[in-house]
Image: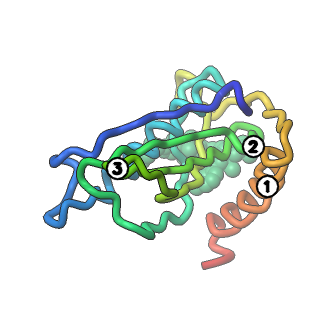
Amino acid sequence: MRESQVMTTQLVLPNDTNQLGNLLGGTLMHWIDITAAICAKRHSGRVCVTASVDELNFHQPVKLGEVVTHQASVNRAFRTSMEIGVLVTAESRRGEGRRANNAYLTFVAIDKHGKPVVVPPVVPETPDEKRRYAEALQRRELRLRRRRGEER
Ligand SMILES: CC(C)(COP(=O)(O)OP(=O)(O)OC[C@H]1O[C@@H](n2cnc3c(N)ncnc32)[C@H](O)[C@@H]1OP(=O)(O)O)[C@@H](O)C(=O)NCCC(=O)NCCS
């Protein structure tokens, strides 16, 4: 898991904010998506596309001038898909850090014809990685049930 981890950092600039000086949700989603895509590509060695994004909640605003860091890792690889977890932290102008958000995305590795291709497994090593690996399977089952329309 460690080998494909990705960290990206952004400074929240005026063009990234709304009238209240808060980071736009869509911009944050874009940064999350890009960080996760790099992580999926690093793990699989393939071009990867976003198949789905789980529920995303915005608990606290991120303000103009704050520094946003996204940490992505492959929680688990399945056959052609991978669950990528992204942890978002915000750092105030005074240098105080806080957890701002977290997201789970499913990426699928594709070949040059756009067809899904098999990806290598991930090896969880630490207790935290093993927990995320186990939970990823439960989330996948829920996700696929929703996709089939069995749950709302
Ligand atoms: C994602 C995509 C490649 C899947 O292709 P597909 O023909 O449906 O392929 P499959 O049904 O064989 O699914 C392939 C894998 O994707 C997973 N998958 C497909 N849709 C999913 C979804 N909505 N949520 C989670 N996983 C999904 C399947 O479970 C399968 O995983 P596995 O091989 O690890 O078991 C295809 O739907 C696609 O190209 N979508 C557009 C992607 C895109 O443009 N994204 C940018 C954002 S708009």
Residue 149 image label? none
| Label 2: how many Cα within 10 Å (few below 14, some 14–19, many 20+) | many
The kind of secondary structure element at disc 2 is strand
For the residues bearing labels 2 and 3, Cβ distance under 8 angstroms: no
| Label 1: how many Cα within 10 Å (few below 14, some 14–19, many 20+) | some
> Quick check: 55 left or right of 79?
left
Residue 137 image label? 1
> Quick check: 7 left or right of 34?
right
For the residues bearing labels 2 and 1, Cβ distance under 8 angstroms: yes
Q: Where is residue 123 in the image (x, y as percent from the top left)?
A: 83, 33
Is residue 151 positioned above or below 85 on the image?
below
Distance from mark 2 CB to nearest ligand 1 atom below 8 Å: no
Is residue 148 positioned above or below 66 on the image?
below
Residue 76 image label? 2
The three-letter amino acid code for the residue at tag 1 is Leu
Q: 87 or 139, which is in the foreground?
A: 87
Residue carrying label 3: 94
The kind of secondary structure element at disc 3 is loop
The three-letter amino acid code for the residue at tag 3 is Arg
Q: Which quarter shows the C terminus?
A: bottom right
Q: Which of marks 2 and 3 is nearer the N terminus?
A: 2
Q: Which quarter shows the N terminus?
A: top right
